[in-house]
Structure formats: C-alpha cells, structure tokens
Image (tube, helix red, strand yellow):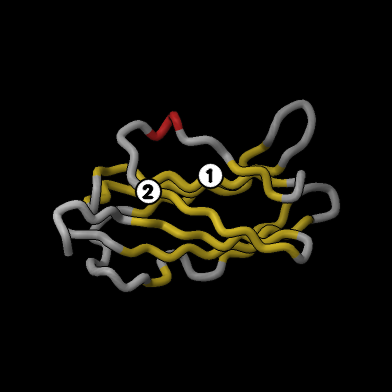
Amino acid sequence: MSAHATAVLRCEVGYAGTTRQITARPVADPYGVESVDIGGRFFFKPVVVGRGSRVDYILLYAYLDQDPRPVMVQEAKYLPPFRSGKKPYLLTGEQHLYAGPVERELIYRCWLRGVTP
C-alpha cells in the first residue's frame, strides 16, 4: 500500500425503496462531519476518526427527522483492530432500524478498506 493511501468507509443506506451510497474518510475532528439526509425522514452520519490509512475509531449515527428536532435512533462505535488491506470487507453487517409512529425502516451496511495497523 502506498504511503498516501487513505482508509475509506463506504455505506449503502436504504429507505423507501431508494439506496444511497455515502463515503467517509478519516478526519481529525469528528464534530465537523455533517449528517446526510435520507429521504426526508432520516439522517445518517458516518464518522471515521484517524489519519490517512490509520483508523482510531468509527462512529455511525442514525436519526429520525421529526419536530422539534431529530431524535437519535442508533449510535454504533467500532474500535480497532480493523482488518488491513485494499480489499473492502463488510464491517457492520446489514442493519435494520425502525423508528417513528409508523415504524419507518432504515437499512444500512458499511464496508471498510485501506486500513493499515
């Protein structure tokens, strides 16, 4: 792997028959990462903290968008050791989240690649 390789987390997030791909790369400051709107009902926020190919930890947040403010549905934290290498591997498995008065379903799964120990 090159000295300039960067770890990449790629998530497929599905809601109401539509799937979005969201990519996250290592950041030093997790507070600067913005949530992604999913179908006007959910927000999804993948945060990879580290630098380059080093990953210190990964946080995944899912929120239900409702008044007066979004409500957290899930927070998942992944800690090292992570598998190293260029080939992506499924980090999260397939996650099904249900929220709101009519139990709307958000489905996601995330793959990680490019990590060095």
Q: Position of residue 60 (x, y in %)?
A: 48, 49
Name the element at disc 1. strand
Which residue lies at the image location 57% right of the left edge and 39% below the top edge?
Answer: 35
Which residue lies at the image location 35% right of the left edge and 31% below the top edge?
Answer: 29
**How many residues crowd mark 2 within 10 Å: few (<14), some (14–19), many (20+)?**
some
Which residue lies at the image location 23% right of the left edge and 56% below the top edge?
Answer: 5
Of labels 1 and 2, earlier in sequence is: 2
Q: Nearer the viewer, residue 57 or 74?
A: 57
Residue highlighted by disc 1:
45
Name the element at disc 2. loop
Residue type pointed to by label 2? Arg
Indicate the quadrant containing the C terminus: top left, top right, bottom left or bottom right.
bottom left
Q: Residue extending furthest top? A: 68
**Which is more foreground, mark 1 or mark 2?**
2
Q: Nearer the viewer, residue 76 or 83?
A: 83
Residue 114, image quadrant: bottom left
Which residue lies at the image location 37% right of the left edge and 48% below the top edge?
Answer: 25
Residue highlighted by disc 2:
25
